[in-house]
Image: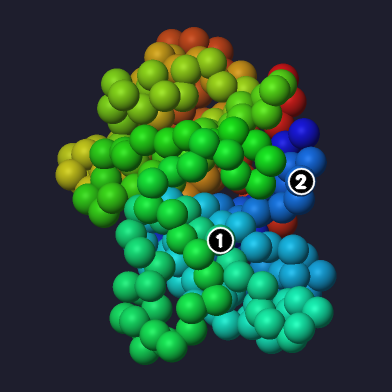
Amino acid sequence: MLKIKFYGVRGVYPHGGEQMNSAVVTTESGPFLVDLGSPLIFEDMELMARLDHTLITHHHPDHIAFLASLIISRLAIVQDSDGEAQPCNFVSPHPVKEHMEYVGINGIESYTEHIDIPSRWKGVGLSGMVTAHPAVNYAYKISTDKTTLVFTGDTTYSPELADFCKGVDMLVVESSFPDENIDNALRWGHMCPQLTARLLDEAAPAKTVLNHFVEMEPDDYRRAVIEIAEGEHEIICSRDGMEIEVEP
């Protein structure tokens, strides 16, 4: 069983009350975070107490804005029988410790981190690849014995990404620029509708969830992809607060 709840779906400049990228994936073994761009996760203290695992795609602000807040919050709300804080566990392409030092909170070490991607994570299989993006970004593949989910993080199209996503049950893919800005999309490591359409035609995921909206509104981006794609694809737009189950 894999379920996703989106707590933020916008890229680097959110507006209209929407939040930057953050989602909670729930498995049979409990929930974990993918990125930390939204403060909405802090509204549920019971959930916060259970969020001891986090996958970070990369260290741009719209994906790690509340990284330090998560670590500090769990110091206060999660303790063992001896009163010791329970550590957070991270997978991240860059050291979490460097970020904590950068924001001036370098005396807190109540976390563990993995730069290399472990093969198991919160009871599910985990693998990844480095995508085409200026900052080192991990795309994560999360697998149970029945379903497979990919979060791309920030990326532009590449044949390697299409191969990594081939045939997955659900693909959560970033959706940043309009086609008239394809040069910027390629230069800055992001998607536009024609690049998303190419990815979907080659990878053929069972369902696609568009995410990380920047210069286009979600429904406009979806319509543009459908118009360009050669194949028929089931495509939905993520929304703040949306919950969805990954089905085989």
Q: Quadrant of the N terminus?
A: top right
Query: Which element is circle 1 on?
Result: strand
Name which of mark 1 and mark 2 comes first in the sequence: 2
* Vertical side of 136 occupied by 39: above or below: below
Q: Is residue 198 left or right of residue 227?
A: left
> Which is nearer the eye, 188 or 145?
145
Which amino acid does the dot numbered 1 rest on?
Asn
- Residue 132: percent from the left, percent from the top? 26, 39
Query: Which element is circle 2 on?
Result: loop
- Residue 189: percent from the left, percent from the top? 26, 44
Q: Is residue 20 left or right of residue 129?
A: right
- Residue 185: percent from the left, percent from the top? 26, 43
Question: Disc 2 designates what residue?
Answer: 29
- Disc marking residue 89: 1
- Is residue 219 visible to the viewer in this orientation of the structure? no
> Which is nearer the eye, 204 or 103?
103
Q: Is residue 180 left or right of residue 165?
A: left
